[in-house]
Amino acid sequence: MKLQSYAFLLFLIMGITAGNTALASDSLHLCINEIMQSNVYVVFQEQDFPDSWIELYNPTDSVININGYLISPTPNIDDGYKLDINEIVPSGGYTLVWLDKEARGKHANFRLNSVDDGKLFLFDKEGALIDSVFYPAMPAPDIAYARDADGATTWHYMVEATPCLSNTSKISDVLLPLPKFSVGGHVMTESEELTISIPHYTPLPDTVCPPGQIDRGKQLSSKR
């Protein structure tokens, strides 16, 4: 399991990019700043690991009470959940909203599908749409999709999630699934050939590996 995790991290780092950190043109409203579809070990809350969460960021010069703000998985405000909690987000501050179908306080009445892309819409307490974001599928757990910097206009995968912290983690525009191992874990008593490969269905952009240079398998010889 550790070998798979390390290999996955290596594949993820292959896609690291500098990104565009230009600030969003609209800094007058609360905004969605970070998304995690499948939270397994990153955030522990109320004796549990909520299924998914989003981070809201306050880019304004004033405090914002999030009570009455609404988050929806569709452009239809009626499909969303109205936050039912008096919580103040300071200027430059953050708060997390749990998308876990519990429908209470900061726990929305829906959750994010962990394998599909989707959209999120944020409405203010008057019902005006103030932010929306399209997010790609995140097939691996504990991977965040976030603005390159707090309030920035561009988004990338984060090498390390930053819930309620500034978005300063390294970023990547590529998220590869776990590598495939040709044999399962076992104690080796003699030399064996092991193949570690990227699944063949995985699209690799030219920025990661130029055409004609994609090596989807690596032959390794291991001996106990």
Image (cartoon, grey):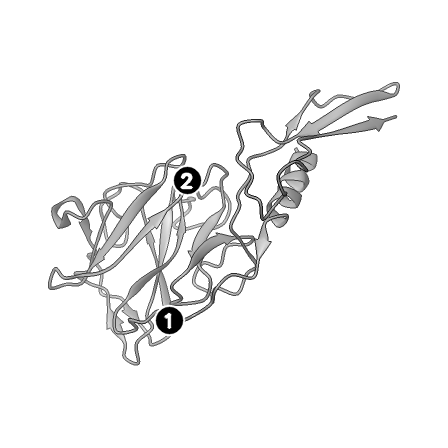
Q: Quadrant of the N terminus?
A: top right
* Marks 1 and 2, the one that precedes in the sequence: 1
Viewer-side residue, 220 vs 106: 220
Q: Residue at x 51, y 45 (%)?
A: 41
Taking the image as shown, residue 218 lies to the left or right of residue 104, namely: right
Q: Label 1 to label 2, Cα distance in Å?
A: 27 Å
Mark 1 Cα-neighbour bin, 10 Å: few <14, some 14–19, many ≥20: some
- Which one is closest to the eye, mark 1 or mark 2? 2
Q: As shown in the figure, which amino acid type bears the numbered disc 2?
A: Ala
Viewer-side residue, 137 vs 34: 137
Taking the image as shown, residue 148 lies to the left or right of residue 116, namely: right
**What SS does tag 1 mark?**
loop
Q: As shown in the figure, which amino acid type bears the numbered disc 1?
A: Gly
Mark 2 Cα-neighbour bin, 10 Å: few <14, some 14–19, many ≥20: some
Viewer-side residue, 13 vs 223: 13
Q: Residue at x 80, y 21 (%)?
A: 193
Q: Residue at x 28, y 49 (%)?
A: 120
Q: Quadrant of residue 213?
A: top right
Q: Quadrant of the C terminus?
A: top right
Check if mark 1's residue and mark 2's residue have beta carbons within 8 Å.
no
Taking the image as shown, residue 110 lies to the left or right of residue 197, namely: left
Count of marks overlaid on the render? 2
Question: In the rendered image of this protein, does residue 131 appear above or below residue 141?
Answer: below
Q: Which residue is under mark 1?
A: 93
Image coordinates for residue 17, horizontal then vertical, percent: 57, 57
Question: In the rendered image of this protein, does residue 129 appear above or below residue 199?
Answer: below
- Which of the labelled discs sits on residue 137, or is there none? 2
Viewer-side residue, 215 vs 163: 215
**What SS does tag 2 mark?**
loop
Image coordinates for residue 178, horizontal then vertical, percent: 59, 34
